[in-house]
Amino acid sequence: MAEPTMALNQTAPPAGNPVETKGPASVAPQAPTGLEEVAHSLGHGRLSVLVRVTLPLLVPGLVAGFSLVFLSAATELTATLVLHPTGVETLTTQFWAYTTNFSYGAAAPYALALLLVAMLPGVLLGRWFERIAGSGPT
């Protein structure tokens, strides 16, 4: 029987560029450091600059990273099949079970539910970014 750490190592994403770091890592270099320097020159402390300047600049990347992780976790099959407890069924395992038995009609509701769960972060992010773009300077 394989040890749990072996199963976790086999199902973990590649360590070179995990999906959860892509959002913040892509936004952080684009944040202008001059804004933080201006806030410091106006007398704001480090915590105030972090809360009022740095975090608002990083929020879009953090939300995008969260959405990518949510989407990856919601549709993950390999880790779910290896690590799920006996008697616990998820959308993904039920979909897989029905499709392996060629019961596509029975698998359709699970596929639709997975599709809706996967669309949710994209729709919410799209609306949020449209709202931000609409309220920004022209």
Image (tube, rainbow, N blue to C red):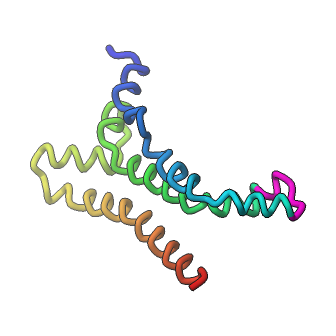
The x, y position of residue 95, in whole percent, is 24, 50
**Quadrant in the picture for the N terminus:** top left
Residue 46 inside the magenta-drawn segment: yes
| Residue shown at the point (54%, 51%) measured from the top left | 24
| Residue shown at the point (43%, 45%) measured from the top left | 19
Residue 5 visible, this angle = yes
The x, y position of residue 7, in whole percent, is 36, 24
User: Magenta residues?
Assistant: 42-49
Residue 85 visible, this angle = no
| Residue shown at the point (30%, 62%) measured from the top left | 115
The x, y position of residue 21, in whole percent, is 50, 45
| Residue shown at the point (40%, 53%) measured from the top left | 71
Residue ranking furthest to the top: 1
Residue 67 inside the magenta-drawn segment: no
**Quadrant in the picture for the C terminus:** bottom right
Q: Is residue 34 left or right of residue 114?
A: right
Is residue 107 depicted above or below 81 in this figure? Answer: below
Q: Nearer the viewer, residue 133 or 123?
A: 133
